[in-house]
Amino acid sequence: MSRDDEIADQALQDILELEAQVAGGEIDEERARRMRRHYVCVAAEAMASPDDTGSSGPRIPAGRAPRPWTLAYVLGATVALVAGIIVLPASIVERPEGGAVTGIEPMADAPGEAPVVDPAAVDDEQLEQVVAENPEVIGMRLALADRYVAAGDHGAAMRHYLEAVRLRPDDPQVRTRLAWLLLTIGQTGPALENADRALALSPGSPDAAWVRANVLIDGTGDVPGGVGVLDGLLARPDLTPDIRSQVEDLRRRALTDPGGGQ
């Protein structure tokens, strides 16, 4: 582990401990806000620094990688939160006919209202501006953070996920996304903690269950535990054929590959 990795790991642990202290009433919110800002900056800067070990990519066990379901499937929750909330000037929303779509699309405009912002129609800087001007709209913040995760900008994603946790500590989708990012950067313990928290808040969440299965299989090496979670998902009648296929694929690989789920 490089020095930057160690700094990021410690900063993330400090953030988790800080949130526990705030929840326990040990630290007031004003002081916590200053401390949180410092820790987030430290973690983001460390994760953005070149890895002096010469390695690249997320810090996960060799030969393993988180499954992509969350970044494709969980986005539906973000869409539902965003649709009908944010309205942008036409100069920002307009895009060329046939412009590319990145996968985060509003389901539909609210009847009789101005068009909502399509996160795929604006660049990162514009979306940052929207989030800054509408900090209470968690769905838009998650859409931006998801975009950063997809681009591999883990520091920027972490900044927004942690702010979302501060604003909505009991939102299972926020906890699920944070758990996924923590797994991606090799923070197995905190990833499992947040996945468990998400499931405690929403026991029926397939997203949280999927992330927990990935953490157990790819993070801790607990294949039986992860397969048990996947079996629970496969017992659900509401999985789409595509999602069911991905769950079955991970289950099969976890049982047949001695290196884990990959």
Image (cartoon, rainbow, N blue to C red):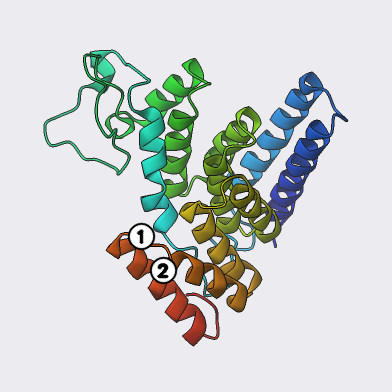
| Residue under numbered circle 1 | 239
Specify the amino acid type for callout 1: Leu
| Residue under numbered circle 2 | 247
- Which quadrant holds the N terminus? bottom right
**Is 67 drawn above or below residue 124 in the view shown?**
below
> Is 146 situated left or right of 119 in this image?
right
Q: Secondary structure at mark 1?
A: loop
Where, by quadrant of the figure, is residue 46 drawn? Answer: top right
Q: Position of residue 150 (x, y in %)?
A: 42, 48
Q: Position of residue 139 (x, y in %)?
A: 45, 31
Residue neighbourhood size for the residue with mark 2, other residues' Cα within 10 Å, grouped as few (<14), some (14–19), many (≥20): many
Instruction: Evaluate if marks 1 and 2 touch, with contact meaning CB atoms under 8 Å apart.
Output: yes
> Is 58 situated left or right of 188 in this image?
left
The answer to whether residue 215 shows anywhere in this view is yes
Q: Residue at x 46, y 76 (%)?
A: 251
Q: Position of residue 106 (x, y in %)?
A: 29, 33
- Mark identifier at residue 143: none
Dot 1 or dot 2, earlier in sequence: 1
Specify the amino acid type for callout 2: Val
145, 42: nearer the viewer: 145
159, 251: nearer the viewer: 251
The answer to whether residue 61 shows anywhere in this view is no
> Is 252 situated left or right of 84 in this image?
right
**Is 195 drawn above or below residue 17 in the view shown?**
below
